């Protein structure tokens, strides 16, 4: 089994022209976005106008006007007309584009045409970008172990027919690669992506993309005093757990600084000695998705050759049961000297992240972003549609939320005022790992992590409640969404966060 997804070779072309019958004839499938406003005028100017007008009237009578599908005369190529509001939000654009790709059922090796017909110049670029992003996401192959060979959803080419300025295709492709990597790794079964193979996969990724690679094994972490991380790894069957650091160094002459990306990589979470129940454990191979999103973000940003350095710190272990498993009421000391009173073995994510954040902070990055499938409380608060954002710079809340609106990966900032700390008072150690009940656990987890990030480093913590949603989310059709790569690329666009931090 390949540990990393294969590079895809779909060619992406841009043409400055309106949709013509000839252009449709040169492709095997097409999606044409049309405005919800003045639709009838727009339809009149399309090839095969009378067919579309008739279908439109019928759909209008039936009351379903989201899209039309047909194989116009003389062609076996499916065409989907997608109706969208000119000023739709990024999330709505991506969701509509995903529906159109699902409806299209493009044949294997198809040449697909994408067009925004009669859409304002201000919106047509964004709409085409969403259609491209959704197409790439829909045709990204995922690991499969079926003994019967399955046809990979490959496309030969995607042509963007535009009437406005050109689209930054490289950016969309880079983000897609990062997202694909995150979804691929998360989908791998836990007996394939164990800690050893995960490290191998990241080593391979580093070789392919010229990243520096360093692995802090248990012995190195013991020397670093990473007692919180090592408490979690104790019950593992083999000694493969550790922290991986991937390093991208920007080729830019004038660099904007250094970003640290940190991710939770629990390859399987049994809950530990406070064992999870059947349903709670069912998909716990996905508990490494935070680290996969961090690695995917690194991949996307490095492909864009961003003008700042990136260190990516991935906390890789399992959370197992066994005679050596860490227990409630143990006291352990993290790498920054903070002592922790353990309360619940299933709150292992914050233990593993505590030391990883502390190690990342030692190298004095200009900002830290961490990603984790951390708390059920965050899902209870937001459902799987949004992820939670927490920061030690509350003045960034507006930017953080707006970036979610702009990217289509929506986040919601939560408070993390200092007085929450009293809920984590310990009579015996510096801090309690978590409270025995789960009230506000997403906030308390953020307050806990805050103890391992020096105040002078701006820090964003993303609790990935939107990492797993049945039916997918926005342009992503799979249950594991890879949420966070697209968000990060928007947040760090032109080093914006570094300039504000
Ligand atoms: Zn857990």
Image (cartoon, rainbow, N blue to C red):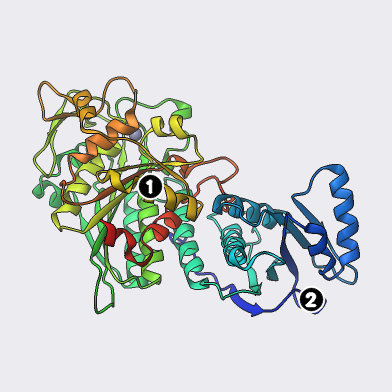
Q: Which residue is mark 2?
A: 20
The image quadrant of residue 499 is bottom left
Horizontal arrangement in the rendering, residue 389 relative to residue 245 (left or right): right
Q: Which residue is mark 1?
A: 398
Towards the viewer: 32 or 266: 32
Query: In what quadrant of the picture does the C terminus appear?
Result: bottom left
Image point (85%, 66%), residue name: 44
Disc number placed over residue 25 in the picture, else none: none
The image shows residue 166 at horizontal and vertical percentages of: 56, 76
Identify the mark nearer the N-term, 1 or 2: 2
The image shows residue 387 at horizontal and vertical percentages of: 43, 42
Towards the viewer: 489 or 353: 489
Q: Is residue 199 above or below residue 443?
A: below
Horizontal arrangement in the rendering, residue 45 relative to residue 335 (left or right): right
Q: Is residue 133 above or below residue 60?
A: below
For label 1, being within 8 Å of ligand 1 is answered no
The image shows residue 254 at horizontal and vertical percentages of: 24, 76
**Which element is circle 2 on?**
loop
- For marks 1 and 2, give the CA distance: 43 Å
Tell whether label 2 touches label 1 (CB within 8 Å): no
Work out whether residue 296 can be spotted: no
**Which element is circle 1 on?**
helix
Image point (61%, 77%), residue name: 13
Image point (39%, 56%), residue name: 488
């Amino acid at each position: 089994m390949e540990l990393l997804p294969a590079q895809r070779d779909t060619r992406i072309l841009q043409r400055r022209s309106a949709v013509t019958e000839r252009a449709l004839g040169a492709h095997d499938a097409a999606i044409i976005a049309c405005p919800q406003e003045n639709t009838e005028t727009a339809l009149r100017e399309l090839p095969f106008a009378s067919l579309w007008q008739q279908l439109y009237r019928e759909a209008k009578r039936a009351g379903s006007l989201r899209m039309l599908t047909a194989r116009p005369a003389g062609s076996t190529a499916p065409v989907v007309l997608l109706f969208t509001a000119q000023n739709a939000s990024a999330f709505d654009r991506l969701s509509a584009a995903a529906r159109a790709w699902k409806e299209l059922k493009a044949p294997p090796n198809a040449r697909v045409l994408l067009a925004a017909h009669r859409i304002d110049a201000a919106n047509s670029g964004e709409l085409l970008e969403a259609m491209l992003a959704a197409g790439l996401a829909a045709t990204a192959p995922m690991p499969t172990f079926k003994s019967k060979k399955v046809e990979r959803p490959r496309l030969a080419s995607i042509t963007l027919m535009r009437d406005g300025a050109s689209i930054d295709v490289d950016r969309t492709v880079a983000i897609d690669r990062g997202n694909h990597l995150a979804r691929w790794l998360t989908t791998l079964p836990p007996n394939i992506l164990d800690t050893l193979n995960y490290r191998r996969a990241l080593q391979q990724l580093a070789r392919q993309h010229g990243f520096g690679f360093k692995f802090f094994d248990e012995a190195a972490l013991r020397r670093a005093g990473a007692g919180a991380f090592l408490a979690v790894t104790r019950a593992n069957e083999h000694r493969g757990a550790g922290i991986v650091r991937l390093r991208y160094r920007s080729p830019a002459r004038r660099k904007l600084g250094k970003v640290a990306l940190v991710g939770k990589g629990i390859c399987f979470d049994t809950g530990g000695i406070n064992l999870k129940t059947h349903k709670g454990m069912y998909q716990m191979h996905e508990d490494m998705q935070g680290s996969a999103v961090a690695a995917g973000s690194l991949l996307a940003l490095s492909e864009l050759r961003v003008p700042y350095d990136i260190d990516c710190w991935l906390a890789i272990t399992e959370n197992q049961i066994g005679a050596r498993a860490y227990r409630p009421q143990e006291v352990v000391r993290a790498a920054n000297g903070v002592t922790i009173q353990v309360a619940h073995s299933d709150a292992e994510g914050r233990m593993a992240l505590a030391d990883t954040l502390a190690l990342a902070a030692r190298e004095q990055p200009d900002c830290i972003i961490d990603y984790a499938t951390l708390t059920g409380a965050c899902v209870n608060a937001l459902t799987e549609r949004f992820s939670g954002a927490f920061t030690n710079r509350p003045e960034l809340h507006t930017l953080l939320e707006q970036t979610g609106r702009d990217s289509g990966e929506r986040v919601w900032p939560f408070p993390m005022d200092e007085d929450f700390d009293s809920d984590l008072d310990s009579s015996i150690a510096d801090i309690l790992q978590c409270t025995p009940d789960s009230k506000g656990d997403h906030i308390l987890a953020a307050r806990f992590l805050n103890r391992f990030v020096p105040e002078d480093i701006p820090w964003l913590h993303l609790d990935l409640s939107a990492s797993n949603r049945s039916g997918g989310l926005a342009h992503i059709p799979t249950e594991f969404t890879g949420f966070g790569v697209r968000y990060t690329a928007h947040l760090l666009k032109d080093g914006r966060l570094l300039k504000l931090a």
